[in-house]
């Protein structure tokens, strides 16, 4: 500020202290001024978001997974499991004379295995099988090429694990 030809400077504060309004807090680490009401709003928003996540995390989740089976570089078929409704699906994608099958068991099935076949030709849409599996049960399944007439499995994926 200039006054009558003299340069006046504001007093320097070597401690970094600033003049503050009582309702304003200065965050020295970021250099921002936050009003108390704004700080309270941020805290309430964070608490609300945390509560929403906790409620969402407590709900039962449903898994949907699928697997594409490749043999000799060709995607010969695929299978899927939908935990909501306990549905398995299978699709024969390659006209090689073999069927595609999904084989599964569940922790509530006493070691018994089940199959869902697509045996009526390639590229004609998926076949779907519905099972009744208790919620939360461990479901182990895989996709295979197979001979429908004999039930012989030819090429299979590794076992996949989901939960009903």
Image (tube, rainbow, N blue to C red):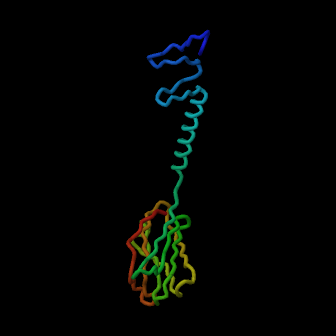
Provide residue 11's location: percent of width, then percent of height: 51, 13
Write the residue at 54% across / 23% down: 25
Residue shown at 53% from the left, 75% from the top: 129
Q: Residue furthest top?
A: 4
Q: Position of residue 64 (x, y in %)?
A: 51, 65
Give whichever of 5, 85 is nearer the camera: 5
Residue that appears at 59% across and 26% down: 35
Q: Quadrant of the N terminus?
A: top right
Relative height, residue 39 to residue 157 (above, below): above
Residue 39: give x, y in percent of width and height.
57, 30
Q: Give 3 or 87, whichever is nearer the viewer.
A: 3
Q: Is residue 48 left or right of residue 104?
A: right
Residue 144 position (above or below residue 38): below
- Asked where in the image residue 46 lies, by quadrant, the reply is top right
Nearer to us in this view, 134 or 3: 3
Q: Quadrant of residue 2?
A: top right
Foreground residue among 134 and 9: 9
From this view, report whether residue 128 is shown above or below residue 5: below
Please identify the quarter of the rendering in which residue 157 is found: bottom left
Q: Could you tell me how many numbered marks the image carries?
A: 0
Extreme residue toward the front, this view: 5
Q: Position of residue 112 (x, y in %)?
A: 41, 74
Residue beneath the point at 55% across and 17% down = 19
């Amino acid at each position: 500020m200039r006054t009558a030809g003299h340069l006046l400077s504001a007093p320097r504060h070597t401690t970094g202290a600033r003049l503050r309004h009582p309702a304003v807090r200065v965050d020295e680490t970021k250099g921002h001024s936050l009003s108390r009401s704004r700080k309270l709003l941020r805290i309430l928003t964070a608490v609300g978001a945390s509560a929403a996540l906790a409620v969402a995390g407590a709900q039962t989740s449903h898994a949907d997974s699928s697997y594409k089976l490749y043999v000799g570089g060709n995607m010969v078929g695929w299978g899927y499991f939908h935990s909501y409704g306990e549905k398995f699906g299978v699709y024969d994608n390659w006209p090689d004379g073999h069927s595609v099958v999904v084989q599964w068991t569940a922790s509530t099935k006493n070691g018994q295995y089940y199959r869902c076949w697509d045996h009526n030709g390639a590229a004609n849409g998926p076949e779907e099988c519905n099972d009744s599996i208790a919620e939360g049960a461990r479901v182990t399944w895989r996709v295979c090429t197979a001979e429908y007439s004999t039930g012989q499995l030819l090429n299979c994926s590794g076992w996949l694990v989901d939960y009903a």
